Structures are given as structure tokens and as C-alpha cells.
Amino acid sequence: MSVLLVEDEILILEIVQDALEQAGFHVRAVPSGSAALEVMSEGVEELAGLVTDVRLGVGPNGWDLARHARRSRPDLPVIYMTGDSAADWPVEGVPRSRVVQKPFAVGQIVTALSTMLTEIDTDAAAQG
């Protein structure tokens, strides 16, 4: 399963990427919102999830990326990582997403993504 990871702080990007890969995910890691849009243009359908920082500097932020991805994939799991924007999540975040507050243990990201994927599988099975 391929996950798009977007984080402008390289150390955090590498740590989260490593944790996701150890959990069995194939990770496309990019350092900006613009680079994330390029990956999405290749096919959001191929992604199992989006893990994104909220504040990404110049260009699209994490809120923008999630809304863009959800236009093509309404069920795409979205995990937001943020140090100071968690209070904006109810207004800015896409429905059925999760927010993980920085600083976090990387296991929180893996658990949040795995939980969302399980919920989607359960919903699909229930709908038959």
C-alpha cells in the first residue's frame, strides 16, 4: 500500500517515513505541497492514504492537499500532523480524517493510518 507523506521538516519526514515503511507501507515522501500535488497528478487512486503536515511553507498547505485528494478519492484516509493548527481541524479538515498533535510518537501516525484503513475495509464489507 502506497502512502503519500508530506512534511517540510526533513528530520520529521525521514522519521515518519521510516516508521511507515517498517509498518509495511510503500512511502512517497515529499517536502512541499507543490511536490505533493505533482504526485497526486500521477494518480490519487494508487494511494492508500495521505499523511501531511498542515503548515508547509509556500504553496498549498495540508488542508488544501487533503481537499484536493478527496475530490478524486472521497474515502482516502487523511492524517494531519500539526504543532499548532489542531484547533482549526473541525473547520479546515476533511471529514473522517485524524489529527495528530506534534510532538508525537511515530507509532501514533502508524496507528491512526492503520485504524482508518481498517474502518474503510469494515464499511466496505458492511455495504457488501
Image (spheres, grey):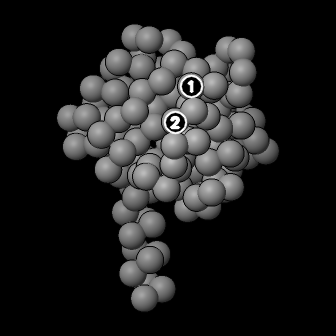
Mark number displayed over residue 39: 2
Q: Residues within 10 Å of mark 2 (few under 14, many from 20)?
A: some
Amino acid type at image mark 1: Ala
Above or below 3: residue 127: below
Q: Is residue 81 visible?
A: no
Q: Nearer the viewer, residue 110 or 68?
A: 68
Mark number displayed over residue 35: 1
Residue at image location 28% in from the left, 42% down from the top: 25
Residue at image location 20% in from the left, 35% down from the top: 22
Above or below 115: residue 20: above
Q: Tag 2's secondary structure?
A: helix
Q: Position of residue 109 (x, y in %)?
A: 40, 37
Q: Residues within 10 Å of mark 1 (few under 14, many from 20)?
A: some
Q: Quadrant of residue 62?
A: top right
Q: Quadrant of residue 71?
A: bottom right
Q: Circles 1 and 2: CB distance less than 8 Å?
A: yes
Q: Position of residue 15 (x, y in %)?
A: 33, 20
